[in-house]
Amino acid sequence: MSVDIDLATIWAFIIAFAVFAYVVLDGFDLGIGILFSSFAVGEERDQAMNAIAPVWDGNETWLVLGGGGLMAAFPLAFAIVMPALYPPIIAMLLGLVFRGVAFEFRWRDPRHRGFWDFGFTAGSMVAALAQGITLGALLQGIKVVGRGYGGGWLDWLTPFSLLTGASVVAAYALLGSCWLIAKTEGQGRRRAYRLARRLGVVTIAAIVAVSAATPFLTHDYYTRWLTMPGILLTAPVPLLVGVLSLWFWRALDREEEYRPFLLVIALFALCFVGLGISMYPFIVPNQVTIWAAAAPASAQRFMLVGTGIMIPIILAYSGWSYWVFRGKAGATGYH
Amino acid sequence: MFDHVDAVNLARAQFAFTVSFHFIFPAFSIGLASYLAVLEALWLSTGKHRFLDIYRFWLKIFAIAFAMGVVSGIVMSYQFGTNWAVFSDKTGPVIGPLMAYEVLTAFFLEAGFLGVMLFGMKKVGKRLHFAATCAVAVGTFISAFWILSANSWMQTPAGYAINAQGQFVMAGSWLKVIFNPSFPYRLVHTVIAAYLTTSLVVGATGAWHLLKNPADRNARTIFSMAMWMAALVAPVQIAAGDAQGLNTLEHQPAKVLAMEGDYDASPNGAPLILFGLPSNGEGRVRYKVEVPHAGSLILKHDPNAPLPGLKDYPRDQWAPVAIVFWSFRIMVGLGLAIFGLGLWSLVARARGKLYDWRWLHRAALVMGPAGFVAVIAGWVTTESGRQPWTVYGLLRTQESISPLAAPAVASSLLAFVCVYFAVFGFGTWYILKLIAKGVEVGESELDDAPIRTAGITPAGQQP
């Protein structure tokens, strides 16, 4: 059996794109969920909910594409990573259940609205934390035996994975607050600016901490990041993070509407590039490369046709949906 | 080793639990999405406000059911990896692409237009809104297409080879994989089942309000539409079920024998066992009530055609007969009851008494949940009947499992049970509350909810 090398690389980029799309899109609505409990009951909460209600389902679909795409394009990686991360994945799924139904349930049951609002926050928090832990656990390495996971069911739990977990919670909350800056007015917006400042500090500190810890996880990361000639390639990444952070601050000072959100996305993109530098071409670090995990070319080619046609169409109508609900969510919703 | 077997059974229980719960929602929303499209089309073409009221009434219910379907569906896509890693590794190259196509062509379509369907009427206008409703309805069907193709491939694998790593890979053509031998039958049977399930819920809603107020015009419209659906589609479903039975006999004979409870071969024509207590241990059905030759008549359309028995197959390839035997009877029994309800409604309609026969309304009310029960019973039959295989005849369930410790699977199973009963229990209650309230004249839009509940004056247009 021959595996088409280019095809595997293309698919690695497609999966990465899906994951990044998910992180940005569901990132801001999970972030609003994380912050939700801190908003005043009534207008402020309703406004925040209105800012995401029409789009959350589409955002979450990227997670299904990431998972389903991984199973189809890199089944071996899916088969190793999912059991290794069993508890956080299950926790994420249950968290998503609570927050997903809260969108409808809170309107249907005023008597239990407090409960569903709490479920919305707790579910978003758990999902974000679990996703961050998943990232950290993947980065720190997974034990592989044969064609499967070879470790215990709590191997993922380390200080590093908890750090990445907390970092993702902070980062999503930051993105959520920047979305609220763009989508709300009045009291809610002023609060969003304040939140964005605080969360900006926390997120950038978290990026620094994770970046500082990563090279010392395994020797390979150290070589990639901190020795010649790799450092010539990698040095611009932290430098750009610094530049973007300053720019982000200036945008907050000038009370700009959309720029903070876009700059946080750029910050996410840089972290993503950093992740790529650490991992490529491995899909399970130091264990399984994208070529070893790749599904046969027949499967990858078959899906490439559909992906090539459908992704632009999906982006077009998803973009249209965002366009329909553009502008301020307002206290009175979309009417 | 004992630990390992335990993990297998726990993982099976978890899959059975989560998939059964999940399927309740699509079984309802596939039919409801189409019903909504029909209602909106009726409103647009006749201009009668009544249809818009009914549309908005069901749209609120759809929003709740759809949200529950989405969140319970995400669980399914990840469960392949968490609990069935070896299965994922081995079958990913064949059924993975089918599920990826489901995401690309169905999930995004539904999700992308759902926001407009729920909240966008005033923003995009009637025509585009109708297009969004249709997009969601078509999306639910496309979703059924792909996931049933993947499921059918597990039942009747085709177009595959096995590579050096032990993975199933496509061989020949993807069309052979997608349109594997049982797929067309399953697709038709399942989609019709979803339509019937919805029509029974809609019918029960109409019946409930007719029982309270026989002059309720909206209830009359709802009830009449639902009864047309049940009357016209139930016979088609019986024919589709029969065709699927013959197809199963051809490709998975041992499953059909388990459904029939035929342990021994019947060289001169098999009886139809109506009831009894199958026992795999004794290899017979105790206390059975049977009709001679009727089994062969149904399965072979010839009363004297010989049929094999389960004992012609190795003992370790038998499905759990008692489960399959009974779930099959529940499904068929309810199917016949639905058919009967449809006939009864036709008689009532022919005599001009559709809105007057209270016993008909009571029967329709009682039958409200029958579709869900029948659909779940049908899935139990086909999935349990596939045992002991995940990929029929090729990959055993025991060999498909992730390398997991039993406590991990047990705790996640417990968590799923608690969360699902709590969350989906509430959701079902909210749906029942809406149903009990009934269609109101000048039914509010779904997106009015935030205004009303927030106690803020509806300001109308946004800037």
Image (tube, rainbow, N blue to C red):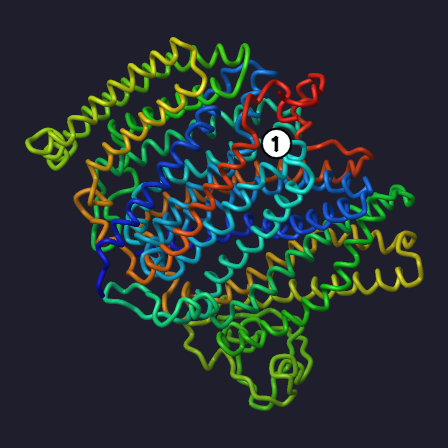
The structure residue drawn at horizontal position 19% and vertical position 36%, both measured from the top left corner, is A278
Q: Amino acid at mark 1?
A: Phe
Residue at which label 1 appears: A105
Q: In which image quadrant can residue B240 be found?
A: bottom right
Q: Is residue A201 above or below residue B231?
A: above
* Foreground of the two, A138 or B5: A138
Q: Quadrant of the C terminus of chain B?
A: top right
Image quadrant containing the N terminus of chain B? bottom left
Residue B330 makes an appearance in the image: yes
Farthest-out residue, left: A228
Q: Is residue B411 left or right of residue A146?
A: right
Mark 1, chain letter? A
Instruction: Provide residue B62's location: percent of width, then percent of height.
Output: 65, 42
Q: Is residue A3 left or right of residue A200?
A: left
Q: Is residue B69 left or right of residue B82?
A: right
Secondary structure of the residue carrying tag 1 is helix
Q: Position of residue A309 (x, y in %)?
A: 42, 52
* Residue at 42% from the left image edge and 74% from the top image edge: B315
Residue B387 visible? no
**Count of numbered labels shown in the rendering:** 1
Q: Name the residue at 50% across, 39% down.
A: A318
The residue carrying pointer 1 sits among few (fewer than 14), some (14 to 19) or many (20 or more) residues within 10 Å by Cα, namely many
Asked if residue A278 is positioned above or below residue B379 in the image, the reply reads above
Residue B408 coordinates in the image, percent (x, y): 36, 43
B122 lies left or right of A267: right
Q: Is residue B70 above or below residue A133?
A: below
